[in-house]
Image (spheres, rainbow, N blue to C red):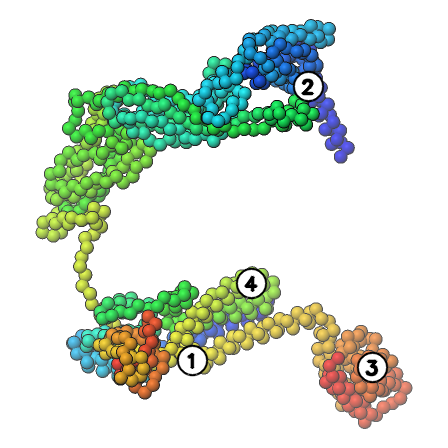
Amino acid sequence: MHLISRKITGIILSVFAGILCLNAPVFAKNVSVELQLDRQMVEVGDMLQIGLYIENEQNVPAPQIDNIDGFKIQYLGPSTKVSIINGALTSSITHRYRLVAMKTGIFTLGPFSFTYKGNNYATQTKDIEVVDRGQGMRQNDLSPGQQPVGNNLSGKIFLNLVTDKNNAYVNERIAVTIQLYVSRLSVRDIQYPIFEGQGFLKEDFGPPRQYKKSLGNELYDVVAFQTWLYPTKSGKVSIGPAKIKCNIVSRTQRSQGRRGLESFFDDSLFSDFFNRLQVYPKEVISDELSLDVMALPDKDRPQNFSGAVGDFTMKVKAAPLKLKAGDPITLNMKISGAGNFDSVQSPEIASEEKFKIYAAQVSKEEAGIKRFEQVIIPLDKSIINIPEIVFCFFNPKNKEYIMLKQPHIAIQVEAADEQGVKVIEGRSLVHGAAPTHVLGTDIVYIKEDIGRIRAKGKKIYSNRWFLIIQLFGFMLLCAAFIFQKQRERLSTDISYARKLRAPKVAREKIKKAKEYLAANKAKEFYDALFKTLQEYLGHRFNRPSAGITAEVIEDLIKAEGLDAEVASKLKSCFSECDSARYAIVRLDNVQMRKTMAVLEQAIDYLERHKL
Amino acid sequence: MKRRLIIIILIAIFPITGLLASNLQAAAQRKTPAYGMFYEANELFKDNQYEQALEQYKAILALGIESGNLYYNMGNTYFKIGMLGEALRSYEQAKGLIPRDSDLKANIIFLESLREDPVLASPQGWLISMLEYFGGYFSIDRLTLIGVFIYWLLIIIGIGWCLLPHYRQALKNYIICGGVILLFIGCVWGIKFYDIEFNSYAFVVDEVIDVKFAPSEEATTYFKVYEGTRVAVIREEGKWSRIKTPDGKIGWASCFALNKI
């Protein structure tokens, strides 16, 4: 952690040192001063900003500017700037002032001078014209009822209508672009342009394009809308003027009559805060354009020219190429290029001999492409190719008619199945569907096989054994569920597991004891009996078997609320066992049997009574 | 683990052996005299002896057995004799056994088109319609077997879920999917079962019958029903049956003009 913070400190110091090094040449440079104005003309009562731009020095305090004739002045604040161009670092500070024009006339601003570090600096002078209100703005810039906002819109927003050519042929495609130029204005809600005119057809505008363009010393934001025109008649055709509606957003101060408290905040920060936005509708109008439209030349005009003007290519595909006489062939013809596609008609088939030819349909139309589909039917097996396909258009660039030709397409026609060829006219054939046949109607014939037979009216679900088997399945599931639950309990509930185990253990031990009894082995018998008692009671009461003694047993039986007589019987058993095991007394076979019977009764009693 | 898997596999084999036994039983049935009789009846039909063919087909039914193809051929024979109502009734019986048979469907559509006054069924709710649609795709026996198959799959997976605790998470999704499928099949089966066991249907076998407001010849005629119309028999009273047509009209018709399925 400590190491990291040391590293960071090192980096910061290095960067700081680098900046200082970069700044070093600045101090050596000459300081230059410039007076900047945001406009050359204002109306009386309007505000303008001036700036004292000081290059190569950022620590110059704001120069004190006294009253200027015809203006009220207010200091707004400084703004600093550092830039590195081609490795050369420059820094500057601009002190901004706001001037309010008080009277008309032409005024000279500057020179403004100040002293810094013992040196005197002075700006150049600049003239500014103050005019009466209303003179600085075109009347059609704002809609009726709207007040000027103090900014002259002339040159800040205008509309330009341009075409890609000044003269064209009828039906030729002409690109029309409407450009909205905006500079130093906030414009929003720009609507699509509209323009009037006669003697042409126009397409809809595409999505607008935005870019920046410099005109003179001004940099403009340009919004360009483009569309296409197709002149429909020859002669002079006028286009426009184009109009665009939009909203201009302007910042304005509150009226003078409401100054009161506002004067308290009369400094740059608060005056900006109290300025408010106003939206003014605006219609920007372009100039009108005129176009010379020429008629298409009559000379060399082909007979099958259908009016297409532009520059096109043609591709033709036919399918199938191997067929029987009377079967349809579909021609797919694609015209692509640039021009007026509305005037593009289907290519023509040069000869109709031995063919049945249907009207071509437009199958698809997209930008720069038009596709046609046409069905033709060869009527004779002697046909070996599809006739030439021709498409004519006028190319305005070369000023000549062009004829595109698709050479013969070889096909293989076989004889028809029937005598002669019968072409069935109809919609379905045009689309390549099979001709409609009238079908007979009757019932479907009988079945040869009897199929799957079953006892009449018998259902599977009414079979008793079937139902029992299903029930058995459910019982199996229940058994599995119970079994698993039991297993889970045995593995988690030790007391329960031991309780279940107790009678099994007792049976095993008693069996062993009985063997000793039969063999009249008293010591072994009482040993086995003692272990039986200990283990059984240990499991039964979930206690350690070794801890079960005659003293403990009475308490256990009482605690569980069982018969006290059982406790005394078990206690006497324990006593007899102890006496016999440690050879205090010698017990005969009869006594051994009695003890065994007492033990069995006690275990039986305990098994019958749930704890 | 191994022992438990063996138990589960044995349980899985159990219903499969049941199905095999059922197939063996069907094979045994093929040795019945019905086959020869069916062949003879078909020969009579081919010789255009429709009355005799019909008698032979009925004789097979009298043996206490039935099949979809037998009812189908009977329907064809009735049609050839000119008994449209009886033919449709036989096809309906065949439909209960071979519901997806395309010949049968074609014949039913053809005969329906010949009816004098086809009655359109009243529209039902989408759920019932959907369940009936699936129900119509399978015979009740086939539907039962599909249901039983899913049921046993669920039993086996359920036992696996109980005995193999480590696989519970994996088996849970199968149980849910199987349960949903079984529920759907159960609903379809239930509707079909109810229709078979608790509804009674009949076909109009006379050319046209008057359906009356009351079970009496003197009662006013409410509407007419034409041959081949399938009606639900709600109640019977003497020689009169209270019937309901597919479009929901209810009235009394003579029992003699109806033949119950």
Q: Is the residue under label 2 in contact with that under label 4 (CB below 8 Å)?
A: no
Q: Earlier in the sequence, mark 3 or mark 1?
A: 1
Comparing labels 4 and 2, the label whose residue is closer to the camera: 2
Q: Residues within 10 Å of mark 1 (few under 14, many from 20)?
A: few
Question: Helix, strand or loop at disc 2?
Answer: helix
Q: Is residue A290 above or below residue B215?
A: above
Question: Helix, strand or loop at disc 1?
Answer: helix
Amino acid at dot 1: Ser
Residue under circle 1? A462
Question: Helix, strand or loop at disc 4?
Answer: helix
The Cα–Cα distance between marks 1 and 2, rounded to whole angstroms, is: 98 Å
Label drawn at residue B56: none
Amino acid at dot 2: Ile
Residue under circle 4? B172
Between A191 and B36, the residue placed more toward the observer is A191
Given the current orientation, which residue lies at the most extreme bottom position? A590
The Cα–Cα distance between marks 4 and 2, rounded to whole angstroms, is: 68 Å
Q: Is the residue under label 1 in contact with that under label 3 (CB below 8 Å)?
A: no
